Image: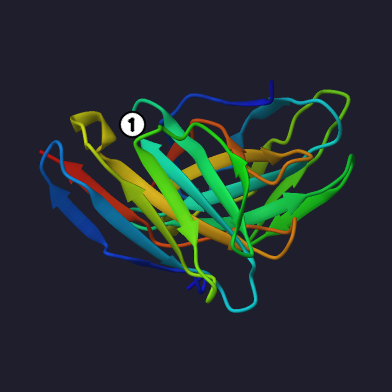
Amino acid sequence: GNSVTQMEGPVTLSEEAFLTINCTYTATGYPSLFWYVQYPGEGLQLLLKATKADDKGSNKGFEATYRKETTSFHLEKGSVQVSDSAVYFCALRDSGYALNFGKGTSLLVTP
Amino acid sequence: DSGVTQTPKHLITATGQRVTLRCSPRSGDLSVYWYQQSLDQGLQFLIQYYNGEERAKGNILERFSAQQFPDLHSELNLSSLELGDSALYFCASSQEGDTQYFGPGTRLTVL
């Protein structure tokens, strides 16, 4: 079946550090891939998405590239801010429409 | 603000009871999805409705049921509640097959 694996957290970084959160997936067919972010006490917000191989999703300085050969969709940001502290979820959607989420990676950015 | 509303924000009840969670989708969205977020299971898809009809089922217990009304709002009914049903319940909505936008969630506590 479909599954998403994210790196274990929590991840703690200093402000302006480089961020990578690893995400790999297992799926039949050609899924769409997503990163959602959940700020403390809030719901999930779509951060970025990619719908086919080699697509790059980007938003608010975050980027992720859909790599079919490595079945990965790693999230990166060149310089994190304290306000980026949140939980980040990688997700896939295959031929059905439901999202299949990873377990989430908690990020804490310190001043 | 995603445009998806959920009520109530918090719900505290006792084991064995029944509760109803309500979701109003974004204007124009015909699909509604329900997800459960718990510490041990993570984010899991429960059920999807499209324009009033059930479209897909995930890990939804038989004690749980949902429906979508002609005005497109949806309700998730949870009955014979157990301690383990304590979780955050999210509703999401989308255009057909498109990006899902999440509501702020309902936090259910079963005592």
A15 left or right, relative to A93: left
Q: Position of residue B41 (x, y in %)?
A: 41, 27
Please say whether residue A85 is visible from this viewpoint: no
Q: Position of residue A31 (x, y in %)?
A: 79, 38
In the depicted structure, whether residue B14 falls above or below residue A71: below
Q: Residues within 10 Å of mark 1 (few under 14, many from 20)?
A: few
**Image: A69 above or below B3:** above
| Quadrant hosting residue A14 | top left
On-image quarter of the N terminus of chain A: top right
User: How many numbered circles are shown?
Assistant: 1
Looking at the image, residue B1 sits to the left or right of residue B109; the answer is: right
B87 vs B90, left or right, is left
Question: Please, which chain is the residue tagged with disc 1 on?
Answer: B
Q: Which residue occupies 69% across, 35% down?
A: A74
Q: Position of residue B93 (x, y in %)?
A: 58, 62
Residue B44 placement, left or right of A62:
left
Q: Residue at x 40, y 33 (%)?
A: B62
Tag 1: amino acid:
Leu
* SS type, badge 1: loop
Q: Which residue is mark 1?
A: B39
Viewer-closest of B7 and A26: B7
Q: Nearer the viewer, residue A66 or A63?
A: A66
On screen, A69 above or below B101?
above
Residue B105 picture location, percent across and down: 37, 57
For the rendered model, the colour scheme is: rainbow
- Residue depicted at 59% across the width and 62% down the height: B52
